[in-house]
Amino acid sequence: MGDDADFAAWYQREHPRLVTSLLLVAGDIEAAREATDEAFARAYAHWSSVSLMASRQGWTYRVALNVLRRRGRRARLEQTLLARQVPPAVVPPPAGEAWEAVRSLPPRQRTAVVLRFVADLTEEQVGVAMGVSRSTISSTLADARRTLARLLGDQDVEVDCV
Amino acid sequence: MSDLRDLVAPLFDRPLVAAPPLEAVAERARTHLRRRRRQNASVALAFAVLISAMSWTVREHRDSLRTVGRPGTPALVTGSTSTTAPSPALGAAGSRRTQHPAPTTTTVAPGAVPDGTRCEAGANGGATDRGVTAQTISILMSSTDSGAGASMYHDAGQVVFDSAMRVNRAGGICGRILKVVAHDGFVRPDQQTNTFAFFVGPGRPELDDYITSGDAERIGVPVVGTDGLTAAQFQSPLVWPVGTPWPSMVRIAVDHDYRVLGARTFALLFDDTFAPGTEAAAAFEAYVPTLPGASIKLVQPSGATDAALRLKSACGGAACDAVVWAGVDAQRWLGSDGATGRLETDDVTSMGSSSLTQACGSALSAPCDSVRVWARYTPAVGSFLNEPAVQAYGQVAKDGANAFVEGAYVGFQLLVEALKRTGPNLTRARLRDTLDHMTFDVGLTTPLSWGPTRVANTSARALKIVNGHFEDAGGGWVRDPLAN
């Protein structure tokens, strides 16, 4: 399934960033862990091709986001069918009010901000992960900046749009 | 706060969860691959069943051909690149079954054809490419027959099979019958040996990964007739979508309301759990501000627990001239989103089912009066059923208002037409060339052709709901105001 040493190094480096990113997107540590494990397993299974991709991070984040979405749909369906009470999301407190503001962004803006500034992906890679064009990501991040500025009352919020 | 990155550092001081050891990752990877192999085994079984059924059908057909002149015997398709109408379906005169109209003909530049090759059985050149033999053309189909969405997408597979069987009853294409191997779920063509072309039905988000990962181009199998619901489908020269992209649908609806109805305040309700919804939202947010005097009152994910409250707060009391629904459950929102007094509600989800008409048929006439539904394909409903192409589709579709199924029908007709025009010397390269240079018009869309942007369909048409039924709202095909 590929070069183990190469994968192991990349895996150890990227795992914390991916699971933290997904936690900030989903607000659910179990969902984030499950999606992370599945994404890396698939990357390992297809490492011979994934390792050659220009954006292996983008591919992996894309797989992880899809797993999150599918899990989210199942959870909502279960909630509807079983009238199950979903426990409130438990998110470790990140630093300061700014991240609370990020958590309150609309899901699409939140995902873009997290992938860009937590996962440290380029806009191109964020586009790959979210399945939209780079220009869409640019405008989404600009929208997030405006929303955050409004939430925080801070005109100096910067979102790096490089 | 000057830099969001400064806030990230504390999150990595202590890892939130430990990374599982590599052995665990490897084991999970093996489980993933075993699951895929099991899926391939079920595909092989389906293939065996299907080829048995098709072999029986071909034998039956040969037997009928031996008796020349028997009334109702289907005609064998002959000729090279010219198109012919499919044979009449067997049935008495005056039957509801009618012929498919002949699609528009565009001559394909002839390539080198081996000597003696003709578009007929026994002379078609045989195994001209992987997935092609003298008798068959192998097409892999990913469908959604189980799980979430099956109720909406399942019939897509049925209309594809029906279309393939009609072609096969007529003798196939240049003497080769279509061998459609269906897989419930997504499977890559390289996992199904000898696939010539790939048809992906609605409800398969894995197609995006297949494209954006580079697999589509690496594997090289043409993916023909996809639904066009996500941006990724327009990013590969190996994919030919037939549906109008969601951003185009949103712009069409907004532009219509602005120009025709004088709407100036807009809101969007969208499903942010999948890519088309988020792409529609991005297009909405980008386009509305370009219209002089227009403004956005709200962009609201429909799944949020307070979505209804927010929508009523923003748009209640006719505060919003127009609200666009993108991927939402129309039946749920009808009458509950503060629609009273509003100019227009535009549903660009494009008729996933008849739930909307059912809701309008039972009650809530006032909100239904202001709903305009935008469709990518001419649906098999109302006065459209007077059109021959719509009638032909209506005979194979259980729900003429289900645009996902209709998209599969249009997409598969494209594949069939392209195979016919490519002729006996059937290779992937020649099929691609055919698709890239043809104009396709099955009578359910505007004429489609694929340029560098890969966006062939940039139009939609509007329907209204009258007495619980879809009817033509007039205005014909409306084009995306930003389309080239």
Image (cartoon, coloured by chain):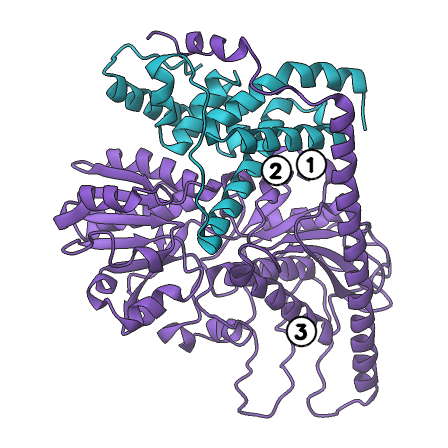
Chain colours: A cyan, B purple
Numbered mark located on residue B209 in the image: 2
| Element assignment for label 3 | helix
Q: State the residue position of label 1.
A: B215
Q: Is residue B110 visible?
A: no
* Identity, as a three-letter code, of the amino acid under mark 2: Asp
Q: Residues within 10 Å of mark 2 (few under 14, many from 20)?
A: some
The chain carrying label 3 is B
Q: Is residue B444 left or right of residue B129?
A: left
Q: Alpha carbon of mark 2 to alpha carbon of mark 1: how far?
A: 8 Å
Q: Name the image quarter holding residue A60.
A: top right
Q: Which mark is nearer the camera, 2 or 1?
A: 2
Q: How many marks?
A: 3
**Picture coordinates of residue B335, whole percent (x, y):** 24, 59
* Identity, as a three-letter code, of the amino acid under mark 3: Arg
Asked if marks 2 and 1 touch (Cβ < 8 Å), the reply is yes
Q: Earlier in the sequence, mark 2 or mark 3?
A: 3
The chain carrying label 2 is B
| Element assignment for label 2 | helix
* Identity, as a three-letter code, of the amino acid under mark 1: Asp
| Element assignment for label 1 | helix
**Picture coordinates of residue B389, whole percent (x, y):** 49, 71
**Picture coordinates of residue B369, whole percent (x, y):** 22, 64
* Residue at left offset 31%, top offset 20%: A148
Q: State the residue position of label 3.
A: B166
Asked if marks 2 and 3 touch (Cβ < 8 Å), the reply is no
Work out whether B206 lies above or below B372.
above
Q: Residues within 10 Å of mark 3 (few under 14, many from 20)?
A: some
Q: Alpha carbon of mark 3 to alpha carbon of mark 1: how far?
A: 32 Å
Q: Which mark is nearer the camera, 3 or 1?
A: 1
* Residue at left offset 55%, top offset 52%: B203
Q: Nearer the viewer, residue B362 or B259?
A: B362
